[in-house]
Amino acid sequence: MSVVGVPADLPDYKRVRRAQIVRAAMDALKGGEYEQIQMRDVAEAADVALGTLYRYFSSKEHVYAAVLMEWAQPVFVAGQADSPLDESGLRDKVRGIIVSFERRPAFFKVCMMLQNTTDPNAAQIMKQFADTAQQTLAGDFAALGIPAAEDAAVMLWGIINTMLSGAVLHGRPMADAYRIVDAFIDLVANSVGRRG
């Protein structure tokens, strides 16, 4: 998958430098809250000048949109299998998404904050982030047919976001997120069973 904002013809040494910056920013978020992270500290950890960091990224939001895409790659790559997941596999995948954010609530907070970014570069990556997540889930609902699979994916992505918002941002039980997504998957599985 090509990442938005990374020119296909970017020389290898620049790709390496960009990746260093993304890794340093990711490590900073793993260790603290977004609001407390200073770009000069990220540049120092990446062993680049602050001006160099800003040659690759237009803003802190742009850096962290790239961090979210990088962090989510294992889920997106797993979702590009040749055939849709069965019900158990889909349930495991969705639980994996929730567990990832449960373990790293700072990443979910950044994801929510970046949904309203005014930086066009960050907004473009966040659009790709949401589109890729929904396309990945739609592929898993393929048995429903194209329009219904896409609708189910949008609904499930909305449920995941809503339930995680309640848990991470408002202190509601994380168990509710698992329960509601399982109930949604049960509804879809029952629908597929009645069609077959």
Image (cartoon, grey):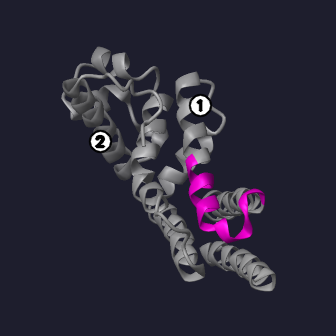
144 lies left or right of 87: right
Quarter-of-image position of residue 91: bottom right
Q: CA distance from mark 2 to mark 1?
A: 20 Å
Give whichever of 163, 191 is nearer the camera.
Answer: 191
Q: Which residues are magenta?
A: 132-147
At x 54%, y 53%, the residue is: 108
| 161 sits left or right of 5 in the view | right
Q: Position of residue 115 (x, y in %)?
A: 64, 39
Q: Quadrant of the N terminus?
A: top left
**Closer to us: 64 or 128:** 128
Of label 2 and label 1, which has the lower sequence position?
2
> Could you classify mark 2 by the number of other residues whose Cα lies within 10 Å: few (under 14), some (14-19), or many (20 or more)?
some
Q: Secondary structure at mark 1?
A: helix
73 above or below 160?
above
Residue 133 lies in the magenta-colored region: yes
What is the quadrant of the C terminus in the image? bottom right
Closer to the eye: label 2 or 1:
1
Expressed as whole percent of the image width and height from the top left, the position of residue 159 reads: 71, 63
Badge 2 element:
helix
As drawn, the label of residue 123 is 1
Q: Is residue 33 above or below residue 37?
A: below
> Which secondary structure class fits the magenta region best?
helix
Q: Residues within 10 Å of mark 1 (few under 14, many from 20)?
A: some
> Quick check: marks 2 and 1 in contact, CB under 8 Å?
no
Q: How many marks?
A: 2
Give me the residue at 71% from left, 62% from top: 149
Q: Amino acid at mark 1?
A: Ala
Residue under numbered circle 2: 23
Q: Point out residue 191 in the picture as x, y percentages from the top left corner.
A: 79, 79
Instruction: Name the amino acid, label 2.
Output: Arg
